[in-house]
Amino acid sequence: MDSNELFKEIKKLIEDQTKRFAQQDARFEAMLARQNEHTDERITKQDEHFEALLAKQNANTSNRLAEQDARFEAMLASQNAAADTRFAEQDEHFKALLAKQNFDTSNRLAEQGARFEAMLASQNEHLDAIIHDQKLWVQEQLDRQTLRIELKIENDVTKKLDALFDGYQITHDKQKELDSRIGSLEKRVDKLEIKAC
């Protein structure tokens, strides 16, 4: 094989290697783009799922608070109806015993007011405790979901990107090594051509 044929073979080898490296680069870029797209889709789905869970929790909380409000209003209405009934009965009795019962009635009304205020205070404390527990639960869910997303990105996406970069780096190093060998071969061809002349 003369130097021209050798040079043609080397040139063809260089062109083939260049095409293969270009194809590898295209495949790596396509893989990276697909991985990024897949990651974005998964994060978007997780965000949508979390928003749906949060909306559902807010709806459940609103429903529970509405039910509690309804029960509280029913209790108040019942208490008011019972008080009205008792007061109507007492009014008939007070007409005959007004002077005697005036002091006792004031004391009883004061006691009833104190009991009613105690009931309201207890109910308010109960509602405050429920709302506080709901806030803590929602915050805990937010923290857990945020931690899961951060761990997912750190454990999956970062490792895959590092692996792709390592593969690209190896290919780049092999390209440099091949370029060096090709340079040496070109020098040898030049020397052979000089000797042939």
Image: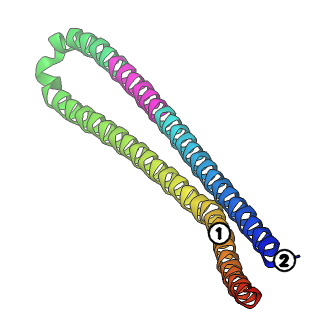
Q: Residue at x 72, y 86 (%)?
A: 197
Please rate how many residues cluster around mark 1, counting C-alpha atoms within 10 Å: few if below 14, some from 14 to 19, many from 20: some
- Percent coordinates x, y for residue 164 in the rendering: 65, 65
> Is residue 110 found left or right of 99 in the rendered image?
right
Mark 1 residue element: helix
The residue mark sitting in front, 2 or 1, is 2
Q: Looking at the picture, tell me which residue is in the foreground, 90 or 163.
A: 163
Give the side of residue 134 with respect to residue 46, left or right: left
Q: Which residue bears the numbered disc 2?
A: 2
Q: Residue 106 lies in what quarter of the image?
A: top left
Q: Residues within 10 Å of mark 2 (few under 14, many from 20)?
A: few
What span is colored magenta in the figure? 58-77
Task: Identify which amino acid the numbered label 1 is placed on.
Answer: Tyr
Q: Main secondary structure of the magenta part?
A: helix
Q: Which residue is mark 1?
A: 168
Magenta stretch containing residue 105, yes or no? no
Q: Nearer the viewer, residue 168 or 164?
A: 168
Q: Earlier in the sequence, mark 2 or mark 1?
A: 2
**Residue at horizontal 45%, vertical 52%?**
139
The picture quadrant where one finds residue 102 is top left
